Image: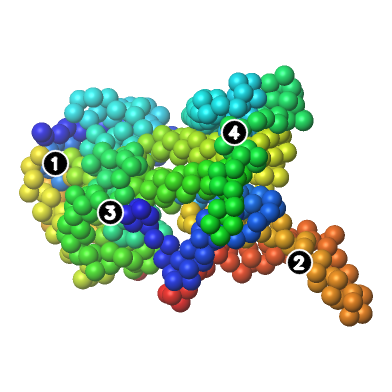
Amino acid sequence: MSVSLETRDLTIRFGGHVAVDHVSCVFRPGELTAIVGPNGAGKTTYFNLISGQLRASEGQVLLDGADITAESAPLRARRGLGRAFQLTNLFPNLTVAENVRLAVQAKSGAHYDMLRPWSLRRDLIARADEILESVALESRRAHTAAALSHGDQRKLEVALMMALEPRVYMFDEPTAGMSVDEAPIVLDLIARLKQDASKIILLVEHKMDVVRSLADRIMVLTNGACVADGEPAAVIASPVVQEAYLGIAPKEKGNAA
Amino acid sequence: MILSGNPPRGKLLTALLILVVVVLALAPFLFPGSKPANVAAKICVFALLVASYDLLLGYAGIVSFAHTMFFGIGAYGIAITLYALGPSWGAMALGLGAAVVVAAVFALAIGLFSLRVQTIFFAMVTLAVASAFAVLASQLSWLTGGEDGRTFRVPEVLRPGFRLIENGPFGITISGRTLSYYLVFCSVVVLFLVMLRIVESPFGRVLQAIRENPFRAEALGYRIIYHRTLANVLAAVFAACAGALNALWLRYTGPDTSLSFNIMIDILLIVVIGGMGTLYGAIIGAALFVLAENYLQTLMGAAFGALNASGAGFVANFFNPDRWLLWLGILFIFSVYFFPTGIVGKLRAEPKS
């Protein structure tokens, strides 16, 4: 079943500050939308509004036509909104394998199964192993998540979302802080996901080369508002983007480095 | 399989656990007399009670001060039915059943109303509810016997006067007291194994996930309020069972033996000393704690006598048996200082470092 996701005038205010300002957008299946914008533009906040970590002050989120604006994050996750976080957000003292199994278990619906030992759920264990292999973490499975390198933690973060087999994938700077060797593993994974035309993929990303190679569409946020949205080539060429974002991009890079 | 795929891990720890369990299993024959029997029964009851608290604190990361309330509900359930209906097995089953249901309903209500809020507020809510319950129990004298509590009679085979075997082989006598002890011991073993299974189940893992990172657990689709509430209910039910067993053993229930806040403090100390989030810590912790509580004074009495006799009067005063609580306190401080992850945590970590 293909999926549809829409935000209508989605807005959130923190006191007087409008972090996301009336953003309306329809995301289509089979399309990878890159969301770009300077730091503090509201990209992650927009994600949080869609996946339910924050509740909108105004506007709606619609999934498959149903208004899910008032639903909690777990219910949205069960509807198929998968989220990988920008700041690594794992279960630090559980092992890598246990982290992924928890996500596989969430997907399987065995939330309250308390009479069988874990070790007998071979189906869940096998599925978790498959996912660990797909992100090249199988050799780290017995380590605790806290003991992983930053790059491996980022991969595990992505693995948790993959294990949920969502219909909407939301990647929040998946390659941030990854080494040159590690980033391609995650980018290949995203490229493979793109081949499934029934899924929606949203990607917050700073690296323009990544955006150019993956995105079917670019959405530009500045000060919480959507200032451009469309074909990558057209968006990158548009004057408003040149001025608002890409114009200052080289400076930003300089600061970051 | 019987340990649900959750072995103690660590040779010393396994040996220690086997020692404690074997000694407890043979206690009535190894140590005749009523005091050792009381100590052994108390170790069993506290191992169960503390393990049920560990389910909350160590696995689900919930801080509750209402655990004695559930312990008390179990104890009063047995006491009230046996007192009112007479010493029959039916009354016992009714008392236990009613206690379990009441404990579960209370835990469900507290959980659904207050587990949404932050840890510290939940702790405060449980403290308030538990205090109110303790006051209620001491005021409703017609039902609970008030401050005096209720002394009741147990079914005949559990009474001290009953003899199953008198002067059997090796001069063994199995009295009703011995049978009572084994009722307590076996129930604790079974309930403990059930808890081990729960923490090693998929549900148990979700509890750990919620303790580790509730935010992420929600993002995966777990509705953590229900998991926390269910953990609260399970812990309450196990605590009520512990209370019921304690009441059966004592043949008495009063505020001091079941609802006192001192018991809550003991539970907290034992769970920390034994090791949080391990379940096995409850067995080791309870054994050490109850032994220290009961025999430290005797031990110090002996040291005091010996030192006095050898003329070291000043030093001897440190070991005056009246000061045993001071030494118990010092022991706790040291054990928390040197084993911050508890005895079990320490013994498990050893091979790695």
Are the residues under marks 2 and 4 on the same chain?
A: yes
Q: Which mark is residue A199?
A: 1
> In the rendered structure, which disc, 2 or 4, sits on the residue that comes first in sequence?
4
Are the residues under marks 2 and 1 on the same chain?
A: no
- Is disc 3 placed on a helix, strand or loop? helix
Chain letter of the residue beneath label 3 in the structure image: A
Q: Which residue occupies 74% across, 62% down?
A: B296
Quadrant containing the N terminus of chain B is bottom left
- Is disc 4 placed on a helix, strand or loop? helix
Q: Which mark is residue B299?
A: 2
Marks 3/4: CA–CA distance: 44 Å
Q: Which residue is mark 4?
A: B156
- Is disc 2 placed on a helix, strand or loop? helix
Q: Nearer the viewer, residue A214 or B244?
A: B244
Q: Which residue is mark 3?
A: A119
B344 to B230, vertically: above or below: below
